[in-house]
Amino acid sequence: MTLATAIATGDLTQLPSRRDEDWRWTDLRGLIRVLPAASPAFDGDVGAGPFAADETVTIVNGHGPAAIAIPAGEARTVALRVVAATDGTAHAARLSVTLGQGARLTLLESHEGRAASYLTQTDLDVSLGEDAALERIVLVADHAEAVTIVDAAVTLAAGASFDQTILTAGARRQRIETRVSHPGQGAAVRLDGAYLLRDQRHADLTTVVTHAGRDGTTSQLTKGVVRDQARGVFQGRIVVERGADGTEARMGHHALILSDRAEVDAKPELLIFTDDVQCAHGNTVGALDEAAIFYARQRGMPEDVARAMLTEAFVGEVVERIEHEGAREIARAWVSQQLGAGE
Amino acid sequence: MTAMLSIRNLHATVGDKQILNGLTLDVPAGEVHAIMGPNGAGKSTLSYVLTGRSGYEVTQGTATLNGEDLLALEPNERAAKGVFLSFQYPLEIPGVPALTFIRTALNAQRKARGEAEISAPEFLKKARATATALKIDFDMLKRALNVGFSGGEKTRMEIFQMAMLEPRFLILDETDSGLDIDALKIVAAGVNALRGPERGMLVITHYQRLLDYIKPDRVHVLSAGRIVASGGPELALQLEAEGYDRYVQVAA
Ligand SMILES: Nc1ncnc2c1ncn2[C@@H]1O[C@H](COP(=O)(O)OP(=O)(O)O)[C@@H](O)[C@H]1O
Ligand SMILES: [Mg+2]
């Protein structure tokens, strides 16, 4: 049951619903009463995306290339633009990203809503060869009326590394899911995210990492800031299977709720079926520290300046973990823009 | 002529608890006054009332700085007028480097006063000189303010901020606590460097020790929310020898 199958078949019963435990906070079945018509092809100008790179792959309204392949030993930076330039229609796209042995890729992925109420699913099948390295930065700028799913299934070989940072401002309903098959064997995963939500926006960051072999690491940090009537969802699951000894996994999810009517639902899960592991998780949901705000005001900062500074610093920890310098700069600017807009 | 800081019959509550009970105090420009008193007397409460912390409610009385009603201003407006509090327990500011924090504060104050922002090179030059004088490792200023700092390091950061912001009226709340004698001398030298005819200071302390290094013009005893005795520096020595017992009884 996925949104993509529902779009392909026109069958509403294929939509994920709250009866499915993994979708209980992001119900689509209850939201979508009629499946819209298929999105038309688009051959207008989509302008420039947020990231610059030598190579750009563009998918508009579900149409575009189906594969990015980096041959063994090569290193590339690719901007991937997933553009929805359609109102009131639905489409899905599927892309495979393959890295050969020792290949390196920085994938600067943007999801750009250029119209209002589109319904989309984007699937990525990501496969990393031995010792390959992928850093995926995902900037999701959907329209407030959009309903979108981005789903990445990632498979790593021994010694590979996968680093990811998701940055989203949410949508009417939005789920960004990442599922990683972790072989252990020196492979390393970093899965980070930031959701900065206002008005009635919704964002769901869901991750599942399955450690199947010994000596793998996963480091996860997600931060959220929600205000107005927005709703953030974090579901993080790390599974350490029998025999995956020497696994090191840590998961942190921390959210600030800046209004009474905003909501955060979090479900961090560590499912461990072996003994020799080091796992830790932390989950906090709260407000800004009023004592720290007074301290900053005593030094001369007006209240809004103090609040913005502390909120930006809170999210900054995620941004600073981005390795690609250009992307880190763009992420910083995005954070201040999201937190500053509409004050 | 009114004093620089003038407090008249100040009453304040915290929660529903009456803490300040008719406190009257004058600190003229150019003078350093010490406030001493037993734990729980209301010393920190006075510092928070003067700086406008929420939850500290003034129910009666006045406080003016150079004739201007302090109590009507927002905390940041008071700071821009030159009021600085060195906190008894400085706050940790995760994710904000000390230098960024101080530059943001300094520029906010300048903006409030209608002055131009400080340039980055000018700010750094001043920060380096100040850090050297206070024996602060410059790299520490690039770390998140006070996060993981020891009590002594936090105190030194308070004095660093004070030296950078150059306030007109300084309130030091138990700045001596947790400092060894060498650190105390450095901190006192930093404070003394700011003494001048244009500045006033209120030095709050439980022990006389700090006053060996920051010599006060006047000493006041605060007990049960009011000033119960005032005198010259010798009063501090007398309190050190005799303790606060007789003042606690006077107040009761
Ligand atoms: N936030 C607060 N809530 C309730 N009571 C407080 C609070 N802060 C201070 N008090 C009380 O006010 C009194 C004075 O405290 P304080 O001003 O901290 O004294 P001092 O600094 O002289 O030791 C004490 O009885 C203390 O328990
Ligand atoms: Mg105190």
Image: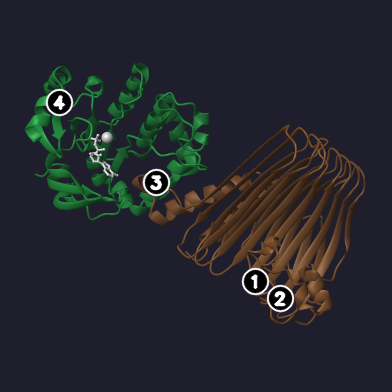
Chain colours: A brown, B green
Point out the tag, 2 or 1, that comes first from the N-terminus: 2
Q: CA distance from mark 2 to mark 3?
A: 43 Å
A69 relative position to B184: left or right: right
- Please tell me the numbered disc located at residue A118: 2
Q: Nearer the viewer, mark 4 or mark 1?
A: 4
A287 relative position to A99: left or right: left
Find numbered disc 4 in the image and state the secondary structure of the residue it sits on. Answer: loop
The residue that label 1 is drawn on is A143
Q: Chain of mark 2?
A: A
Image coords of residue A257 (percent x, y) = 50, 57
- Please tell me the numbered disc located at residue B244: 4
Q: Is residue B199 visible?
A: no
Amino acid type shown at disc 2: Tyr
Which residue sits at x=18%, y=32%? B33
The residue that label 3 is drawn on is A296
| Front residue of this view, candidates A205 and B6 | A205
Q: Nearer the viewer, mark 4 or mark 2?
A: 4
The answer to whether mark 2 and mark 1 are in CB contact below 8 A is yes
